[in-house]
Image: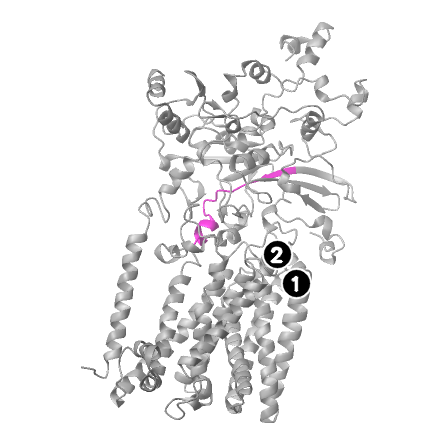
């Protein structure tokens, strides 16, 4: 850590910039400068990202949503909106509530995308409720993304490390990708006038931090991790006999977003 | 000098010039990092990777708020992010400098916040994940006034801290729980 | 999903739309875009019927239909540019077109088609413009000089060369027009996430309705312009055009209905949503207006006109009405496909709503302006290039109104 301290003293402003860019390779800690001489060291949330050159071609990440654990608090939605200043009425991630009665009627709602949580029970359901659960939704980071296929200018793309991202300085805002996404994960951001969507917090992952929705989830319903690491929670879940599925498999998009305990009513 | 096909020659020349100008424009205007990894600007990846962080982790709060951090880290609420209730780190500290006060929930706000997760009326909440209660039945069963705010009994950062301590004093805690110091 | 959702009774509780599906992103502008390109392709086909297939009856509108296509071509990109979030970045479509994108080719296909159409017009009008150049002075003379590429050679050899080039351009233009508009249909047909769009029939239907709108547009505007100018309508030309119109529309309408019938017979999980859409939010605009008023009436009207002996004057009158209705039919079809497809949420559980405002960026007023612009351009084109065979400068040099 000595050289880090020396770097801070040498050119504080430059150091801060570097830290925020996450470009100090070799450090196992994300170092946050503090007033005076001190600094905070934030441990890795995803083991194995820091401390070496990040090789995009060698990464494999997976996101697992555990339906059996989601409590519908909406923390993920709130954190996401704050992290990205998502304009009202548009959602990078949202949480749906499913209610199923004994006649197989399915009632789904998602007031304000789940931003306010689910504070009141539904009172408009006539039948006897059989089952009820929450389903968080976000970008599926497809292996074969429809949005990338249809983008006319190459402003949305799949990175070598498997993230589907948007080049906001290049997007023309034609909204074709929004039409093509089978999961309705995309929207046209009225501030930037470009397409926008969940990035699985690429900027956090590259710094060894979990996506912000995973980090704030109090119920551990959202899990993110490295599939190259056999000890990671996601590797273990995917290797277990749990029922793991993806959304709309018939679309042929092969999402990297898995759902644990997903019911057949969910689309 | 004019022949029967002068106009055709000129048109072909014009089209050739247009094609050349178009080709040149394509070469000149194509962004430099385009095609580095695929049909997109390679530089866009680094730009997204360098997006400034707004949320940090609970560790980012530790150095200044060690006391609260300690209570929270060993309590039942340890899985809750500091920033969910208090707001993102970037609104509080920027470049190592204090930039703004983060909100602290008070009074009825606390009750609303607790009920957001712990409301038993929302049946979709799995029992093994979260303990839910019904209001005001919970207050009645605990024999307290119905206008009680949750934090009058439950420490917001470690909800069973006071309760387990009281139980310990009264000798109600047994086995493992007793060893937990009532956090 | 139960039947209850379609009755509207339970719609308010079963109706679930994905939060990002509440907005209809492709608005009125994207309704106009295939409408305009369709008219271009259709009108071009009319002129090619004369120039390539030598349908002599169509001589009176052979030049007019080309200018008609050109006027709409000039405005085809306007709705798109108005729709884009960043219109200033439109050049990226030409600089870095994504080979896998159904939309990326538009820039190139449109540009090639524009070049072809412009040069076909210039070659056809060259003798006329050489004559006009001799009569005009000042800026107009310079303009004619540029448009004729400085050539005044009207020798038989030169004219013969022009004729060959015109025939070539007109012949190449037919597949190009089919590509231009079939391709527009593919932009929609290639979206697998929208059950109403994703169909291999989509390019076919778009192409056929393009022919319908182009032919109908030529008949409708030709008759109105002639009536307004007090000139005689060539009823033989209108009758021949009406026959082509009727034929194209029969096939077009058959495919449109086949598409729905196929969905209704297969009864996959998509049918619940498509049924809910067509008998729900689209009931008026699809069944009542597109199918009822604007398809069945002209279908039978044209049939009666063509099969039975009808006086020429009555034929022209009713054919014009049928053409007007068919122009509306195609516009409604574009609306029902483009907007209708987006009203169905990908949740498969509900429909959103769409009501364009009058003054907004992609609202009704810009739509009216964009649709009026080609007519203004056509009027301007008519100032430079006489549209009608009977007022070419050689016979009547003063009719440039």
Residue drawn at point x = 24 percent, y = 71 percent: B13
Q: Is residue A153 left or right of residue C18?
A: left
Which picture quadrant has residue A3? Answer: top left
Q: Chain of mark 2?
A: C
Residue C326 position in % (x across, y down): 58, 76
Judge whether residue A149 is colored magenta: yes
Residue drawn at point x = 61 percent, y = 59 percent: C356
B149 shown above or below C290: above
Residue C122 position in % (x across, y down): 35, 78
The segment highlighted magenta reads A134-152
* Pointers 2 and 1 in contact (C-beta within 8 Å): yes
Q: Earlier in the sequence, mark 2 or mark 1?
A: 1
A142 shown above or below A26: below
Residue A194 position in % (x across, y down): 48, 48
Q: Nearer the viewer, residue C136 or C363?
A: C136
The residue carrying mark 2 is: C343
The residue carrying mark 1 is: C282
Which picture quadrant has residue A40? Answer: top left
B40 shown above or below A226: below
Q: Quick one: SS at disc 1?
A: loop
Residue C213 position in % (x across, y down): 53, 75
> How many C-alpha atoms fall within 10 Å of the one at disc 2: few (<14), some, or many (≥20)?
many
Q: CA distance from mark 2 to mark 1?
A: 9 Å
Judge whether residue A85 is colored magenta: no
Question: Which quadrant: the N terminus of chain A?
Answer: top left
Q: Is residue B35 left or right of residue C383?
A: left
A197 shown above or below C280: above
Q: What colour-coding does the image apply?
A: one colour
> How many C-alpha atoms fall within 10 Å of the one at disc 1: few (<14), some, or many (≥20)?
many
Residue drawn at point x = 67 percent, y = 58 percent: C276
């Amino acid at each position: 850590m000595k050289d880090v301290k020396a770097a801070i003293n040498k050119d504080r402003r430059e150091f801060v910039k570097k830290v925020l860019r996450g470009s100090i390779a070799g450090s196992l800690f994300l170092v946050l400068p503090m007033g005076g001489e001190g600094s905070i060291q934030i441990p890795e949330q995803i083991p194995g990202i820091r401390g070496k050159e990040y090789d995009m071609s060698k990464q494999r990440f997976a996101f697992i949503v555990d339906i059996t654990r989601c409590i519908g608090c909406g923390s993920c939605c709130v954190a996401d909106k704050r992290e990205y200043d998502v304009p009202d009425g548009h959602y990078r991630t949202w949480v749906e509530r499913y209610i199923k009665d004994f006649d197989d009627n399915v009632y789904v709602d998602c007031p304000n995308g789940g931003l306010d949580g689910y504070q009141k029970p539904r009172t408009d359901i006539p039948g006897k409720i059989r089952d009820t659960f929450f389903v968080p939704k976000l970008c599926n980071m497809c292996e074969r993304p429809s949005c990338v296929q249809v983008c006319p200018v190459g402003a949305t793309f799949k990175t070598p490390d498997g993230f589907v991202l948007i080049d906001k300085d290049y997007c023309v805002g034609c909204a074709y990708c929004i039409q093509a996404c089978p999961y309705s994960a995309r929207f046209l951001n009225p501030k930037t006038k470009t397409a926008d969507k969940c990035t699985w917090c690429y900027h956090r992952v590259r710094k060894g931090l979990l996506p912000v929705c995973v980090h704030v989830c109090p119920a551990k319903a959202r899990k993110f991790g490295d599939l190259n690491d056999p000890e990671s929670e996601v590797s273990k879940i995917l290797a277990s006999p749990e029922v793991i599925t993806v959304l709309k498999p018939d679309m042929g998009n092969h999402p990297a977003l898995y759902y644990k305990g997903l019911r057949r009513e969910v689309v | 000098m004019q022949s029967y096909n002068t106009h055709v020659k000129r048109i072909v020349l014009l089209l050739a010039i247009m094609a050349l100008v178009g080709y040149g424009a394509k070469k000149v205007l194509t962004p430099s990092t385009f095609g580095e990894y695929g049909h997109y600007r390679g530089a866009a990846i680094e730009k997204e990777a360098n997006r400034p962080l707004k949320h940090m982790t609970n560790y980012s709060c530790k150095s200044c708020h060690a006391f609260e951090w300690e209570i929270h880290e060993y309590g039942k609420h340890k899985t809750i992010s500091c920033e969910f209730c208090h707001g993102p780190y970037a609104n509080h500290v920027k470049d190592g400098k204090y930039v703004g006060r983060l909100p602290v929930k008070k009074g009825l706000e606390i009750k609303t916040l607790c009920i957001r997760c712990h409301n038993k009326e929302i049946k979709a909440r799995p029992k093994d994940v979260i303990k839910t209660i019904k209001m005001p039945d919970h207050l009645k069963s605990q024999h307290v006034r119905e206008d009680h705010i949750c934090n009058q009994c439950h420490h917001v950062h470690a909800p069973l801290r006071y309760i387990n301590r009281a139980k310990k004093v009264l000798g109600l805690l047994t086995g493992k729980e007793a060893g937990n110091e009532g956090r | 999903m139960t039947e209850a959702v379609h009755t509207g009774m339970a719609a308010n509780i079963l109706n679930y739309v994905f939060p990002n599906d509440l907005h209809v992103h492709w608005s009125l502008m994207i309704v106009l875009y295939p409408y305009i390109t369709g008219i271009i392709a259709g009108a071009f086909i009319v002129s090619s019927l004369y120039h390539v297939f030598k349908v002599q009856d169509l001589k009176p509108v052979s030049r007019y239909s080309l200018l008609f296509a050109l006027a709409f071509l000039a405005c085809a990109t306007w709705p798109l540019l108005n729709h884009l979030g960043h219109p200033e970045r439109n050049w990226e479509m030409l600089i870095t077109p994504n080979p896998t994108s159904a939309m990326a080719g538009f820039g190139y296909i449109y540009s090639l088609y524009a070049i072809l159409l412009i040069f076909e017009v210039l070659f056809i009008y060259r003798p006329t413009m050489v004559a006009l150049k001799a009569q005009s002075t000042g800026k107009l003379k310079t303009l004619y000089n540029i448009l004729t590429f400085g050539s005044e050679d009207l020798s038989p050899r030169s004219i013969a060369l022009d004729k060959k080039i015109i025939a070539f351009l007109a012949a190449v233009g037919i597949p190009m027009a089919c590509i231009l508009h079939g391709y527009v249909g593919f932009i929609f047909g290639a979206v697998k996430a929208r059950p109403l769009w994703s169909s291999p029939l989509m390019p076919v239907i778009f192409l056929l309705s393009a022919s319908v709108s182009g032919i109908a547009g030529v008949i409708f505007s030709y008759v109105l312009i002639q009536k307004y100018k007090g000139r005689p309508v060539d009823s033989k030309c209108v009758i021949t055009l009406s026959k082509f119109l009727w034929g194209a529309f029969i096939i077009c309408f058959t495919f449109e209905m086949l598409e729905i019938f196929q969905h209704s017979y297969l009864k996959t999980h998509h049918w619940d949503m498509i049924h809910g859409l067509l008998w729900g939010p689209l009931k008026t605009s699809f069944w009542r207006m597109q199918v009822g008023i604007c398809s069945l009436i002209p279908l039978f009207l044209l049939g009666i006109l063509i099969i039975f002996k009808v006086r020429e004057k009555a034929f022209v009158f009713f054919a014009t009405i049928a053409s007007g209705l068919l122009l509306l039919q195609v516009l409604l079809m574009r609306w029902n496909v483009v907007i209708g497809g987006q009203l169905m949420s990908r949740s498969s559980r509900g429909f959103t709503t769409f009501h364009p405002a009058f003054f907004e960026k992609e609202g009704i007023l810009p739509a009216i302006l964009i649709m009026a612009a080609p007519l203004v351009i056509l009027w301007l084109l008519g100032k430079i290039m006489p549209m009608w065979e009977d007022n070419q400068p050689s016979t009547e040099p003063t009719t440039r109104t």
